[in-house]
Amino acid sequence: MQNVYTRKILQLSPSVKLVFKVLEFKGLMTQKEIVAESYLPPRTVRYALSILKKEGILEERLYYKDARQCLYGVKAPQDDELLSNFACGMV
């Protein structure tokens, strides 16, 4: 999954990259869990999540234990993204 999003991630800020890495290694997490794991302020995490969502990297799901929160994770790459990277020699 890392190779697929490499080009998108390179131009992003360090805090966005950190949130991406936390989600990549830990899987689905709430915003509070991301804040605790990354030691970033809540506002910075919210901003990073919005950027990742805008870039099409973030997956957002309903958190059934508490419907007021969402679970966030790295979106599985689509077939066309995999093929475009393969054609460019990135895989």
Image: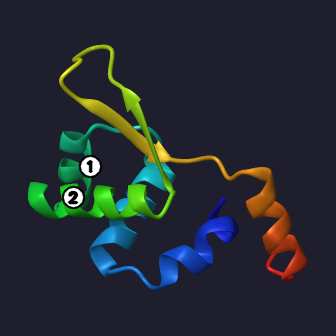
Discs 2/1, front: 2
Q: Earlier in the sequence, mark 2 or mark 1?
A: 1
Residue at the image position 50 percent from the left and 83 percent from the top:
10
Which amino acid lies under the numbered mark 1 shown in the image of this protein?
Ile
Going by the numbered disc 2, the residue's amino acid type is: Val
Q: Toward which corner of the image does residue 66 lie, by quadrant?
A: top left
Task: Say which element carries label 2.
Answer: helix
Residue labelled with disc 2: 45
Nearest to the observer: residue 61 or residue 23: 61
Q: Position of residue 29 (x, y in %)?
A: 35, 39
Expressed as whole percent of the image width and height from the top left, the position of residue 82 reads 79, 61
Q: Can you see residue 36? A: yes
Q: Residue at x 10, y 59 (%)?
A: 43
Q: Choose top left, top right, bottom left or bottom right for residue 30.
A: top left
Image position of 22 (left or right of 85): left
The percent coordinates of residue 77 (x first, y second) are: 68, 53
Q: Secondary structure at mark 1?
A: helix
**Residue for point 25% across, 59% down:** 38
Marks 2 and 1 close (CB-CB < 8 Å):
yes
Q: Which label is found at residue 34? A: 1
Q: Is 49 situated left or right of 11 in this image?
A: left
Q: Nearer the viewer, residue 79 or 6?
A: 79
Depth check, front residue: 2 or 36: 2
Rendered image: mark on residue 25: none
Judge whether residue 41 can be spotted in this image.
no
Question: What is the quadrant of the N terminus in the image?
Answer: bottom right
Which of the image's four quarters has the C terminus?
bottom right
User: What residue lies at 86% left-to-right and 82% top-to-bottom?
Assistant: 89
Where 87 falls versus 37 (above or below)? below
Number of residue marks: 2
